[in-house]
Structures are given as structure tokens and as C-alpha cells.
Amino acid sequence: MASLKDMRVRIASTKATQKITKAMQMVAASKLRRAQSAAEAARPYAEKMGAVISNIASAANGSPGAPALLAGTGRDQVHLLLVCTGERGLSGAFNSSIVRLARERAQALISEGKEVKFFCVGRKGYEQLRRQFEQQIVEHVDLRGVRQLGFGNAEGVARKVIARFEAGEFDVCTLFYSRFKSVIAQIPTAQQIIPLDFEKSDSKAQASAGYEYEPEEDEILAGLLPRNLAVQIFRALLENNASFYGAQMTAMDNATRNAGEMIRKQTLIYNRTRQAMITKELIEIISGAEAV
């Protein structure tokens, strides 16, 4: 049985941990508001750009001059999985849920005889995937030094992805991230970004009036598609940022509650042990007095 001194040290240590988790919860809550606003503000732009490109692409798709980012390479053999995760932990299952989705997709593709490559954005995803797929990781972007995410960060990733596509290193690229729904709900998401995946039978596109483009559709898409790729990656990074703080806030709240419960149990054990020791000493004194 631990001594009273050891119990006091343990209680004090748990209280210190509780203060840390409570402080981290409050910091995550304050950062979540700004991150959530940024993610929600990026959604309409990313969705509208996707809709505009889909409208133009529906007319250009299949033409001999269609950009490769739209038409693809004509093959489906080599897949690049662009996995975006956080730089830090202490956020529950946030990072592992994204990695799990990417790992499941990779294993399914490998079982079909496909070749899989990984492009990791974020330290945690890289560390988890490296254990199983170290040879397949072709690039890792570390954003630990970035204090505030900007469009330039997404553009840098997009340029590297496009360069590898133009070099013929892969045929299909799928983006993995966590879509922010609420503080307690973050949804791991997979989105094909190369070649552009759009609904050819979209009812709104069919119902819209015909347009004549100047310059031609292929020329417009050649400029828009790389920017759309950067926009979709930027949206994923912002969604991830909000999801991370939401998951961290929930995880630290649970940790604070668990620490409080541990303190209660440890204090109860300490008081009972102390009471038992006092009772034992009283019995010894009384017994000694009677013997005299």
C-alpha cells in the first residue's frame, strides 16, 4: 500500500495535469471560433468554383484539347493519396480517423493490383503512415512553422502535385481530410481532385442555358483547373484546422473530467487510509494505557 506522502504527491500531480488540460481546452475553444469561421467562409467559394468548372468541363470533356487535369491520363494504374492531417496530437481520433480512411483506400487499391503513392501534409499522418507505407511516401510537407494558414500554403502543395502529375508519376489523385461538422463531429472525407470528378448528368447543368466561351473552353480550363486544385486543397486545410481544434477541445474536456474523477477517487482513498492510520494509533495508545 502506498504511503500517505505518495498519495499526496499523486493527487497533486493529477491536479496539475487537470490544470493543463483545462488550459488547453480553453485555448482550443478560443482558436476554434476563428478556424471555424475561416472554414465556413471557404466553403461557398470552393463549391461555386467546382460548379463553374463542372459547367465548363461538361462542354469541353472529351474534346482532343481537353486539359490533362480534366481528362486524366487515360489510365487508372497509379494512385496518389494526398493525406492532410494535423501537426500535433492530443486531439482524440482526429488524425487517426483520416489516416484510417486513407489506409483502407490504399489497401483496397493494392488488392486490385494498383500502385499506391502517398503525399503527406502534416506530421501526424506522415508518422502513422510511415510505419506501414514508408517506401510509398513520395513527399511530406511540414506546416509546423506556419502560424496562420494562407492560400500560399495550398498553392505550394498544389504546384508539387501538378508537377508530379505532369511528370507522369501518377494517374489519379485523391485528397483526404476531415470535414468540420461540429465540435463533437468531424467527418473523414475522400475527394478525387485529379482528374476532376464531376457529375456529368447534373440536373442544374442540363437545365442551364448554353454559353459560348471566349477564349475556348479548353483554354479557360487550362488556367482554372490548377487554381481550383489549390482552392480545394486550401479548403481541406481550413476544414482540417477547424476539425483539429474541435477534436482537441472535446478531448481536453474529457481529460479534464477524467482527471477530476481521479482526484475524487484518490482523495477518498487518501482520507480512508489516513483515518485507518489514526484509528490504529489510537487503539495502540489505549491498549498501552490499559496495560499500565
Image (tube, rainbow, N blue to C red):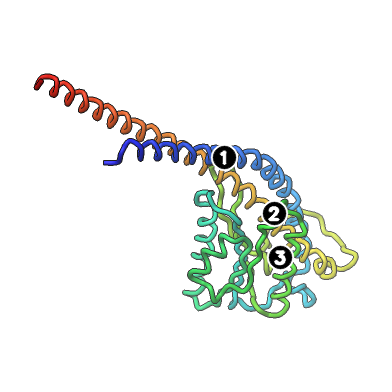
Residue 7 falls left or right of residue 168 = left
What residue type is disc 1 on? Gln
Residue 54: in sight, yes or no?
Answer: no
Which percent across, then down, holds residue 242? 63, 47
The residue sitting at 80% across, 76% down in the picture is 65
Q: Label 3: few (<14), some or many (≥20) within 10 Å?
A: many
**Looking at the image, which is closer to me, 252 or 239?**
252
Q: Identify residue for label 3.
A: 157
Query: On residue 219, which mark appears?
Result: none
User: Which amino acid type is shown beneath numbered disc 3?
Assistant: Val
**Quadrant placement of the N terminus:** top left
Residue pointed to by mark 1: 25
In the displayed image of the protein, which residue is found farthest to the front?
A: 292
User: Relative to 211, is 133 on the left or the right?
Assistant: left
Q: Earlier in the sequence, mark 3 or mark 2?
A: 3
Q: Residue at the spot x=76%, y=62% of the render?
A: 155
- Residue 85 shown left or right of residue 221 in the figure: left
Numbered disc in front, either 3 or 2: 3
User: Where 272 falls versus 203 (above or below)?
Assistant: above
The outermost residue toward the right is: 214
Name the one closer to the observer, 202 or 8. 8
What residue sits right under mark 2 in the picture? 235
Label 3 SS: helix
Percent of width and height locating residue 274 = 29, 29
